[in-house]
Image: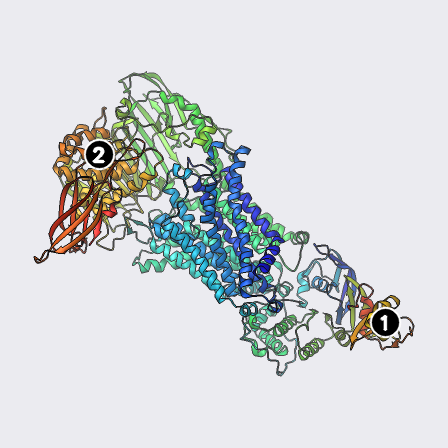
Amino acid sequence: MFWKIFLFEVQNRLRRPAIYLYFAAALLFTIGSFATGSLPLGEKEHINAPYIIAFWCAAMSMMMMLVGSSVMGMSLYRDIEFNTKDYYLTYPITKAGYFWGRYAGSFLFMFVLGTSIILGEYLGTKIGPAMGWRDAPQYGPNKFIYYLHPFFTIVLPNLFFTSSLFYGLVAITRNVKVIYSGGILLFLGYFISVFLLDHTNNATAMALADPFMLTAVRLQTMQSSFAQQNSTLILIYGNLLVNRLLWSGLGLAILLFTYFRFNFETFFSGKRDKAAIDDTTATPKRPLTPTATISFRGAYNRGTVANLIKVELINIIRDNYFWIIMVGGAIALGFAFWMGDDFYQVDNFPRTVMLLDTFNNTFVFFIFFLILFYTGETLHRDRVTRYSFINDSLPPPNWVQNGAKLISLLILGGALSLMPVIVGLPIQMAKGYHLFNFPMYGMYEFVRIVPHLLEMVIFSYAVHVIVNNKFAAHAVAVVLWLGFFFLETSGVFNYHLLLYGYVPGTGVSDMDGLGHMARPILWFHLYWLLFGGLLIILSALFYYRGVSSSFKERLQLIVERFDARTRLWGVIVLLLFLAVGAYNYYNISYVNNFLTKGESDNRAVLYEKTLKHYDSLPLPKVTRIKMSVDLFPDRQQAFVSAFVTIVNKTARPISKLLLDGDELTDYSLKTDGADIPFTSPLVYPRGLFNWFRSRNDTAPYRLYQFKHPLAPGDSSILEVKSSIVSRGFRNGLFGEKLLRNGVFFGGGLPELGYDDDDEISSPYVRRKNHLPEKKEEEIAQDDPVGISTLKAGNTMDLVNVDMTVGTSGDQIAVAPGYLQRQWTQNGRNYFHYVQTQPGLYQPIAIVSARYATFTDSVQLDHKVYIHLFYDPAHNANLQRFVAAYKDGLRYYAAAYGPYSTSDIRLAETSVYGPRQGSMTALDNNAEYFAWNAHFTDPNQFDYCYFTTAQQLAQQWWRFQVAPNETVGSLVIPEGLSLYGALVMAEKKYGKDNMRWILQEQLWPYLFMRTRLNDKEHPLIRADQWFEWGGKASVVLYGLRDLISEDSIDAALREFKNAYAFKDQPPYAGANDLFRYLKKHTPDSLQYYLSDNWLKITLYDNQMMEVSATPTGNPGEYKVTMKIDVNKIYIDEKGNDVPASPFNDYIDIGVFGENTVNKEGRSLTHPLYLQKYKLTAGEHTITVIVKGKPKRAGIDPYSKLVDRRPNDNMKDL
Amino acid sequence: MELVINSLSKTYANGVHALKDVSLTLNNGMFGLLGPNGAGKSSLMRTIATLQEADKGSIYLDDLDVLNRKTEVRQLLGYLPQEFGVYPKISAERMLDHIARLKGVNHPGERKDLVEALLANVNLAKDRKKHLGTYSGGMKQRFGIAQALIGNPKLIIVDEPTAGLDPAERNRFYNLLSQLGENTIVILSTHIVEDVSTLCSNFAIICQGEVLYAGEPDKAVHELEGKIFSKAIPQSELPKYQSRYKVISTQLKSGRLHIRVLQGADPGNGFVPSVPNLEDVYFSNIATRMDVNTI
């Protein structure tokens, strides 16, 4: 019986064209993507890297859910739809045969469909290079396991799960709509995991929440090196294994549950009509007297539209599935809102701007699917219920019927746009947050969400009307929408005038709202809504009414419907659309210079080919800048007039100077009052879309030629005038450094010399353009140029700065240096900052905004003022910053030597800048970082304090001792400052409570070191952020523990004194720091220095067993610990080499129950803590302790670089 | 009023020639459309009901161009499709109210009265608040009838309206139709020849898209007077008779086949003259196009 039904199902499917179409579509789409490399590739990642294959398998099998819903759902639903019940039940079929036969027959096709993914991938990798679309070297070896593994671990489980789910849902509910709700809820699971990926580190939740494993693949890709991506499979273990088992198991469970619940009679006959019983007993008849007045004039059309809309909306909201989907969506959104952003496991306040941003970034896709689905339902409802035979012959004209449906959907779209408000407000209230910011809600809805959702409705509507087949229209709309999305986000093509519904991107902040970006966004939305108007007219022409069957008939109707009035409207909307389009085009492609990603690449190639030889020109050094800066934040404009003193510190005369004014709108250069002549050695071809711009687009690089060359040792004063003027608006975000409220201005001076950072870095693009391979060169620590150049830039050493900044009258401008004077003139605020004795190191930037200020001071050898500049609403954590500055200034000044200026400032900066930054006497934190942390529990880590202490330490370790350009030198600003913060944390929380904090610093190193693209370096030549930051800080902290605080402070002080404020080489490198540390380390501990700085050393210590017995004395216990001590070195080839023999200092500790201090903070309570000298291998240690032991550990505070720090502790 | 159909043709995308040069003239009163399944009845009615385009030809309702001025036609139309559905989650009362609104009954009070009267007439008053999804087939059909009668339609098209109705309901429906007065054109399609003979003043027979006969039922029957003969024969001999006579219908009764033939004169050979009926008219016309003897 099974086989008969199975074969019947198979034959039935083979006869239908749909399955071939699905297969061909998936195959061609995949071939196209792999043949052209239109994939989210890393720079050195192969197009057929196993990770990419796995990614594609996950993404495509997720998309196949759409097909699965039709294939699997319809296999059962057909019998209900076609009413086969009357005869099917009379056949001698068994339940098992029917149920499994249909399932297997349909799933076979899903399986076959799944093979199109790997087949397409494989063919793509062959066709791409064969057709010359991609370079052959961009494809790695094609091993079959790369395809089979993801097929069986990703594609098949995904298809099995979705197929079983859909099949089961239809079998139980006898309803096909349930599939959509199921599908949309699955997408929600995926959205939640995407959200988690972007916002938290909860690897377990994000791996499990995504039924398709796409997020998990992305996560593993993010955490792996290119070598791994290119040559290893996605490993299915741990969370991923659980994910596979969980979702496949769920599929199986659904299937079995359904099977046991499945009942022929119920399935076929359905529910009896319970409510209405046909009772034809005669009732007194009333004669049908035609008394009603009938009129089709006056308000008839308007009233009818209103009435039709009412009926449409009733149809939508009376549907239970609508509420299932809505509630599911609201719960998911609420979850995302509730989770919010966090740093160091401390939540941020649920600020309105964050909620809106979250909604817009992760949820809009969900809304699109919802809208698309309900558009299909609304347009096809009459036909599915066969009410259309009645409805379509009723009097209302087409525009009334058509319009009522469209307006109903627009109302639905409008209502959905309120989701962030409806879900957001209760979440804010529940979290005890009351700064609701209603104007922001309103503004964001008006500018971003409502127009976008209306565009979605119109798009879905037009596609559904024109395609006129529900499933096909869903597919067409999804493919188009995703196509736009991938084109936009990948940067392959992002000309917003040609991607429906796309507008310039923007962030949103409390400080600036949507700022000046609201205007271009509205212009683009107007453009797309007018285009939507054209789509509506098109839909009106294609609107389906009656039973016309052929396309010919529809064309006939179109001609008939394209009457004078429609034509008039068409022309009006078209003209408006073209007018707005022309205005937008004028702004983005005439006033501004739009370039595609390919064009930008080509320009970078041209730049390198044309200008590379100027790399060898000798460059002067800037020694003094006297400038006046005029900021106009409300207009995104800045004007600079500067006198720049340059000195030729080279041995060659300088006659030519290459300048890059990329960031500037215009600039001029004079010396001795006369213009310096220049040529523009680089001219680009015109951008593809910028037809009305000049055919030759002069690049912003100028070659200046001095009349009198600057002889070695000579100096000269250049008079620079520059301006940054944002004209019109651009295709994307612009002016993000000159916001109305939140300026972050980088100086406004042209850059000196050829900059190889502007070169193309992708090896494939380089090869294609015949550029030599680019190697990241490691500058040796004895390289003479390296030690005489600063990491912060090769044209500025210690610079004397005199800066007058003018900004609008309601803003405060903050800059590095000493604030000499501040005044108001013509309604504008002016600030005069000076830093001359001894000058300052790079970078220099000016921030300006409508700040509230908070000032405090601390008395050192001189008085130091602490200034906080912040948005008035973001004042929750001011005392934490101030405390860090006070403690830090006192401690660092005592330990390392005096603080060099009289102020330290912390300013809040915009959402577009970096999270944190430091300059001389000026630190900055972005709006979303630290300012808005919501501390609720005394056990939370005060990262405001910690990161501020770290930034402050850079005043010594970057702005007094500036690192040179050689490899490893960033250990000085990054490692020493983080170490300083660790010391501050120890002083705040106590020595015994450092375990978590130290592990937190080391974790990135332990994690990332296994995923390196290149060989790992020992610390002294650190070339990765997790080496020069986290690892260095822990290694320094460990050294302090061994050689004492006084010794390390003495070493650091001596190092600082030798290098502070140098304006002559040699500048400090990691080897210099190491020299001073070595000098202050006794011989017995030199092993620690050489292990951790000169070699790559990892401990693998473990507490194997621990037991405790009372000794008989009251409260006294004998604790016996069995420990295992291991230390290895990583050799040149990257292999582990056991380090033996050794005899190292390692802490052994026994701990009692944690205690709680008066602030409610939980404290570690050591009963015993002692350094032991331990050799490799197992040891047993017995100690007597007072108090009941709870835990014991080897290196319990994680001071050593230990591969697996978690097994160092064991509970009793 | 007069409905004039002139040379109407329609070919579907799949090649089926649904209407071939159909010309008919209909006047006030009931007009019956007879024809086998797939004859083109529904195509014709849907075209008149503005649901479908024609390839060729014209339809005029007095001066009104039906094919091109659809909205105006719809304002005069009452249509009961052969198959139709309803919104499952909406009550009959609300739905009728809605349709009445669309049919131009703008005054709420009048609308309420109208809906009540209609519901009473189709015997749904008791279940008027129930969702249409819960209705049985017969109830749904009665709902369909009610909606077709809203708004004083001048042109009523009912496509096999009595399918699914029990005999009592069928009679009630026909009575309702008869009430509608003289100045309305009612087009009724049906398989049931008897209905046409009792109700319709005019009728047409359509087969394979062509009009085979159009006229008054009584006249049509009269034309066959003296030309119908019947005989009971053994089943096996049917082919022999078919080759010799114009057999228009057969009926198997207790092992013998009763056949009716259309002959200009008494064929003798055991045939007895029979009183003609409309069924004979129907079968004699259909038989020119297809084999009606289904045994």
Residue B55, by quadrant, is: bottom right
What is the crowding at mark 1: few (fewer than 14 residues within 10 Å), some, or many (at least 20)? many
In this rendering, position of residue A650 left or right of residue A211: left
Q: Mark 2 sits on what residue?
A: A1091
Instruction: Say above or below: A511 vs A388.
Output: above
Whole-percent x, y for residue A718 in the image? 31, 24
A923 vs A109, nearest the viewer: A109
Q: In the rendered structure, which amino acid carries the disc numbered 1?
A: Val
Q: Relative to residue A594, is residue A709 drawn left or right?
A: left
Q: Distance between the residues labelled 2 and 1?
A: 116 Å
**Viewport quadrant of the N terminus of chain A:** bottom right
Quarter of the image that includes the C terminus of chain A: bottom left
Asked if the residues shown at circle 2 and circle 1 are in contact, with their CB atoms under 8 angstroms apart, the answer is: no
Indicate the secondary structure of the residue bearing disc 1.
strand
Image check: B68 left or right of B271?
left
Q: Which residue is rendered at x = 49% and y = 61% of the image?
A: A168
Count of numbered tags? 2
Q: Same chain for labels 2 and 1? Say yes or no.
A: no
Task: Locate residue A725, reporting x and y percent.
Answer: 39, 36
- The residue at which mark 1 appears reads as B261
Q: In this view, does A1182 lie to the left or right of A213?
A: left
Which one is nearer the viewer's eye here, A333 or A124? A124
Q: Residue A309, can we see it? A: no
Residue visible at 44% across and 24% down in the picture: A609
Identify the subunit bearing mark 1. B
| Closer mark to the observer between disc 2 and disc 1 | 2
Q: Which chain carries label 2?
A: A
Q: Which amino acid does label 2 sit on?
A: Asp
